[in-house]
Image: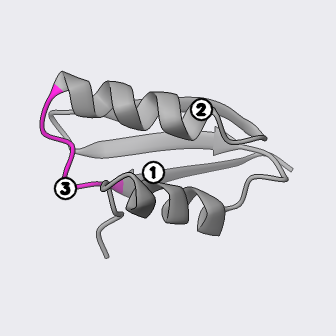
């Protein structure tokens, strides 16, 4: 079952941030697509199991890009 989520990530402040979020989250097994945007400070992620929202959020927090809210 494919899931699409969009997270607000206030720490995305430059293109390096976009690259880091994209590369790190893309490495999670099951993640199909990551589109991060510096202007909106959001990331849209498309994934299937074994990736989960909790795994993605935990990874983002570990790399200092915690999800807002």
Question: What label sits on residue 10 in the rendered view?
Answer: 3
Q: Helix or strand or loop: what does disc 2 sit on?
A: helix
Residue 7: x percent and y percent? Answer: 40, 55
Left or right: residue 36 compared with residue 6: left
- Give the Cα separation between the discs numbered 1 and 3: 13 Å
User: Which residues, given as a range, are shown in magenta?
Assistant: 8-14
- Residue sitting at 64 percent across and 34 percent down? 27
- Residue sitting at 21 percent across and 43 percent down? 12
Q: Are marks 2 and 1 in contact (CB under 8 Å)?
A: no
Label 2 vs label 1, nearer the camera = 2
Our reading of the magenta stretch's main secondary structure is loop
Q: Helix or strand or loop: what does disc 1 sit on?
A: strand
| Structural crowding at the residue carrying mark 3, measured as other residues with C-alpha within 10 Å and reported as few (<14), some (14–19) or many (≥20) | some
The residue to which callout 1 is attached is 6
Label 1 vs label 3, nearer the camera = 3
The residue to which callout 2 is attached is 26
The answer to whether residue 9 is above or below residue 40 is below
């Amino acid at each position: 079952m494919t899931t699409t989520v969009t997270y607000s990530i206030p720490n995305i402040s430059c293109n390096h941030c976009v690259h880091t979020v994209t590369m790190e989250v893309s490495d999670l097994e099951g993640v199909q697509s990551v589109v991060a945007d510096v202007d909106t400070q959001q990331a849209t992620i498309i994934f299937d199991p074994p990736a989960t929202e909790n795994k993605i959020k935990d990874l983002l927090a570990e790399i200092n890009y915690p999800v807002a809210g």
